[in-house]
Image (spheres, rainbow, N blue to C red):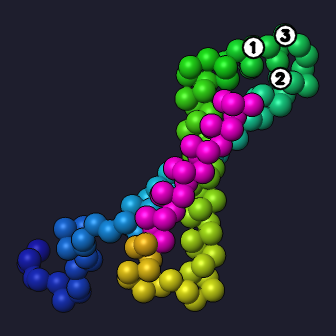
């Protein structure tokens, strides 16, 4: 077999791309979407336990009250709020606004900052009440 050089263009390799906040938020949006799937299964477990009786509900409540359970709930609430902020960012883009490089970068950073701030506020309210 002769080794002729293909005339087809090569696919761009990751090394030619400059890592941007919009890329990070796109990846994080997919990760949080997957985390929401798993977290929703835990919500279903809690609801089924509540409907199954006091013993099952006590077990679920014990788990979600533990350090691991609270860590999972914190992560789930952040994933939910981050995914929501990302959805708002995409909605803005769908209206035709914020598509230039500078604005899209600011929106990406605002998505991250907004989700962290909202999660912090949510958990402060949860702990106080």
User: Sequence order check: which comes first, mark 2 or mark 1?
Assistant: 2
Please identify the dominant SS of the magenta region. helix
Q: Which of 96 and 36 is in front in this view?
A: 96
- For the point 44% across and 80% down, which residue is it? 103
Report the quarter where the N terminus lies: bottom left
- Gap between marks 2 and 1 measured at Cα: 8 Å
Q: Residue at x 22, y 79 (%)?
A: 10
Q: Distance between the residues labelled 3 and 2?
A: 8 Å
Q: In this view, does 102 lie above or below 127?
A: below
Above or below residue 99? Residue 112 is above
Among numbered discs 3 and 2, the one appearing first in the sequence: 2
| Nearest the eye: 3 or 21 | 21
Picture disc at residue 49: 2
Count residues near mark 3 (Cα–Cα under 10 Å), then give few for <14, some for 14-19, many for 20+: few
* Residue 34 in sight here: no
In the picture provided, is 46 more to the left or to the right than 74? Answer: right
Mark 1 lies on a secondary structure that is helix
Range drawn in magenta: 107-129
Q: Tell me what residue is drawn at x 63 percent, y 37 percent.
A: 123
Q: Are marks 3 and 1 in contact (CB under 8 Å)?
A: yes
Q: Position of residue 18 (x, y in %)?
A: 24, 71
Q: Is mark 3 on a helix, strand or loop?
A: helix
Q: Is residue 99 left or right of residue 14?
A: right
Location of mark 3 (residue): 55
Q: Is mark 2 on a helix, strand or loop?
A: helix
Can residue 24 be seen here? The reply is: yes
- Above or below, 69 against 21 in this view is above
Position of 53 relative to 120 (above/below): above
- Look at mark 1 in the image and give the residue it sits on: 59
Q: Tag count in the figure?
A: 3
């Amino acid at each position: 077999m002769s080794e002729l050089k293909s005339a087809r263009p090569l696919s761009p390799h990751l090394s030619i791309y400059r890592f941007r906040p919009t890329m990070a938020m796109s990846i994080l949006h997919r990760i949080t979407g997957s985390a929401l799937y798993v977290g929703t299964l835990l919500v279903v477990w809690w609801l089924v336990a509540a409907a199954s009786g006091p013993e099952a509900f006590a077990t679920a409540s014990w788990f979600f009250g533990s350090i691991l359970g609270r860590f999972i709930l914190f992560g789930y609430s952040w994933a939910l709020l981050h995914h929501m902020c990302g959805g708002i960012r995409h909605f803005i883009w769908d209206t035709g606004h914020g598509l230039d490089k500078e604005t899209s970068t600011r929106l990406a950073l605002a998505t991250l900052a907004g989700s962290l701030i909202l999660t912090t506020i949510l958990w402060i309210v949860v702990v106080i009440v």
